[in-house]
């Protein structure tokens, strides 16, 4: 019953969030700020994760091909499909859930315990719409772009490690990247990134918006936000895979 209570409360919050902003100029300004916070400021961590993931996948695949009749171009194909199907959307989503989710929950939670949200409501401002909607839309816009960026960097990391180690001939790696390319894999990954973006922003916002107590409770809310966001990402990863690829 407690789960149903939180689901209902979460839906009620979303009904308050998805209303037309009262002042378009302020909303656009908040949206641009959140795009910088959630999108642009995440480029560095996405770059580091993606380049090492691409390199590791390439090396592990190359060093585990011990049968002579297995073509070497499968290394490039494996790196490409691994980045497209799973790593650039799901793994990056989990990392962003920890980075952005904790920040969102602590930011809104701090405003709650300092009674800033109550002050907004007294002034007639829809605090949920004012604070949460720009975050959700900014993530939905930014995260697919970060996913595409991660794909490119991951493949480049694989190519770089091929050049440095000579694990496979570079031309075989490039051939594997082109071999039997399925464009829908990119669409599939982008669909997942949009769903994950909604989860990463709305779930922590919920935990921060309804926090009660002091700084200790804000910290607990941030932890819960990251844990529940990660669980939902993994759950919806399975669901979307079954729906889109089965």
Image (cartoon, rainbow, N blue to C red):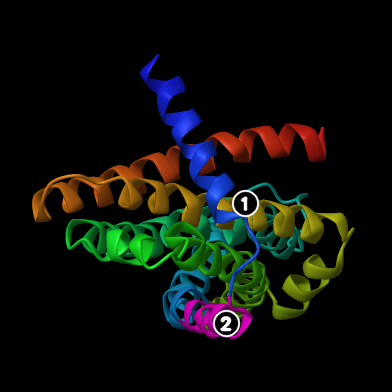
Q: How many marks?
A: 2
Q: Is residue 130 above or below residue 226?
A: below
Q: Nearer the viewer, residue 83 or 89?
A: 89
Residue 228 horizontal/vertical position (percent): 39, 39
- Is residue 99 visible in the rendered structure shown here? no
* Disc on res. 10: none
Task: Tell me: 176 left or right of 202.
Answer: right
Q: Is residue 201 above or below residue 161?
A: above
Which residue does the image show at 77% across and 72% down from the upper left?
172
Pick whichever of labels 2 and 1 is earlier in the sequence.
1
Q: Nearer the viewer, mark 2 or mark 1?
A: 1
For disc 2, the marked residue is 160
Q: Quadrant of residue 100?
A: bottom left
Question: Main SS type for the magenta part?
Answer: helix
Q: Look at the image and give the residue range highlighted in magenta.
A: 23-36
Q: Is residue 173 above or below residue 246?
A: below
* Disc on res. 86: 1
Category of crowding for the residue at label 1, using alpha-carbon neighbours closer than 10 angstroms: few (below 14), some (14–19), many (at least 20): some
Quarter containing the N terminus: top left
Most extreme residue toward the top is 1
């Amino acid at each position: 019953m407690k789960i149903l209570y939180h689901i209902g409360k979460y839906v009620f919050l979303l009904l308050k969030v998805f209303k037309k902003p009262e002042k378009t100029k302020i909303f656009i300004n908040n949206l641009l700020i959140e795009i910088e916070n959630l999108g642009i400021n995440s480029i560095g961590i996405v770059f580091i994760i993606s380049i090492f993931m691409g390199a590791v996948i390439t090396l592990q695949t190359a060093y585990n091909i011990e049968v002579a009749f297995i073509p070497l171009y499968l290394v490039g194909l494996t790196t490409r499909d691994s980045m497209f199907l799973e790593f650039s959307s799901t793994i990056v989503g989990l990392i962003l859930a920890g980075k952005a989710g904790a920040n969102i929950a602590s930011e809104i939670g701090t405003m709650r315990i300092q009674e800033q949200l109550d002050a907004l409501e007294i002034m007639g401002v829809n605090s949920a719409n004012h604070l949460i909607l720009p975050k959700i839309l900014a993530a939905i816009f930014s995260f697919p772009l970060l996913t595409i960026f991660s794909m490119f960097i991951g493949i480049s990391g694989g190519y770089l490690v091929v050049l440095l180690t000579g694990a496979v001939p570079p031309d075989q790696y490039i051939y594997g990247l082109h071999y039997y390319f399925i464009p829908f894999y990119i669409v599939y990954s982008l669909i997942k990134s949009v769903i994950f973006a909604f989860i990463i922003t709305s779930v922590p916002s919920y935990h921060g918006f309804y926090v009660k107590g002091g700084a200790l409770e804000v910290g607990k809310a941030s932890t819960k936000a990251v844990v529940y966001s990660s669980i939902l990402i993994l759950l919806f990863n399975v669901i979307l895979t079954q729906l889109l690829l089965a």
